[in-house]
Amino acid sequence: MSPTRQRPQLHEQLRELLRSAGGETPQVLAVFVDIRGFSSFSTRVDSPEVALYLRSVFTAMLDTYLVEPDYFKPTGDGLMVIYHLPSDPAQVRTKVNEVLRRSLALVENFADLAEDDILVNVTGQVPQSLGIGAARGSATRLISSGQVLDYTGKCLNLAARLMDKARPSGVVFHDPRANQILDEELNSYFTSDAVYIRGIAESEPLPIHVSDGVVVTRADREPIAPLSRRTWSYSDTWLTVTEVRAGGPYGFWLSRAPRSFETASVLAAWDVFGRDGKRTGTQRHAEITGDVDEQPEGHLVSIMLEEVAERTRDLPTEVQGFFKMKPVKIRFQAFLEPLEGD
């Protein structure tokens, strides 16, 4: 008797289907859901209990709230849910309002979602809040032999990024025609705002609608600075070694106000001198973070000159010029840069 052949696993089926996959481009409403605090929950609870919890909450989400999607898939500690939109504008409005209304209800009731499931034996420790991002637009649907394999597109990427903005909990929605789509009652549950999103809206803010519970931070409302790139002041400042050794605070002009994710510093650069008192052709430098002070003319970053004096204690105060002694100077330039890790 030959052994029973096991049914192919999903990933094995996917591999075969990919060989003949093609693309379609429907209009969709993309919804991304994230369980807040799931990472810490999964470290406190045994893995089998975590799996039972996810099974319970995902089932409840899809059965009661995010109902009848055209596609969904787990994303680890959340879900990606796709709804196809009809071509009729009135039906689009109805569909979007329905999904957003159910999303608000899901956020409100999330903490109790697994309460009645007796298989979930960790109800006192489960996550209590949810973040949801939603956006409307075109998406590419990967399909093979009548089976949908996945969705991709800018619309999905945006919904996922909006989900991240829905903190500590709530719903964030973007649509260029949101004010025309949301009905009067549903609109009362949202507040209009605008945020910057790296890779999507870096120099011009993206209009969004946020529900109660979402906190839009100062950093969210500021243009995105280029990663690992400095914004230098417009000009240098030269101080003599004698002035630097006098010590005290000294302010250097910044090119603009620092943003919440930036630090303000000053670069000090000076020539290296040999024993003969002549320049060796090399330079040294130091970077010193300072305090920012707002003035009517702009913003200053102030540092204590003693820090530079200590590093340049071997510098001569004067060197011989063509006809007379000349003071040795140190060049300073202020700059802004993203905080480490941002």
Image: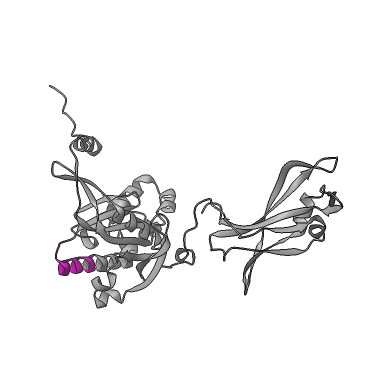
Q: Residue at x 31, y 66 (%)?
A: 109
- Foreground residue, 27 or 13? 27
Helix, strand or loop for the magenta stretch, by majority: helix
Vertical order, 129 against 150 (above or below): below
Q: Residue at x 13, y 44 (%)?
A: 146
Q: Position of residue 148 (x, y in %)?
A: 19, 46
Span highlighted in magenta in the image = 86-97
Is residue 64 shown left or right of residue 303? Answer: left
- Foreground residue, 311 or 60? 311
Which of the image's four quarters has the N terminus? top left
User: How many numbered circles are shown?
Assistant: 0
Vertical order, 104 against 69 (above or below): below
- Foreground residue, 214 or 123? 214
Q: Is residue 88 visible?
A: yes
Q: Position of residue 339 (x, y in %)?
A: 56, 55
Q: For residue 59, what is the image quadrant?
A: bottom left
- Foreground residue, 275 or 104? 275
Question: Does the magenta run of residues contain 93?
Answer: yes
Q: Is residue 118 visible?
A: no
Is residue 52 shown left or right of residue 269? Answer: left
Q: Residue at x 80, y 55 (%)?
A: 241
Vertical order, 87 against 74 (above or below): below
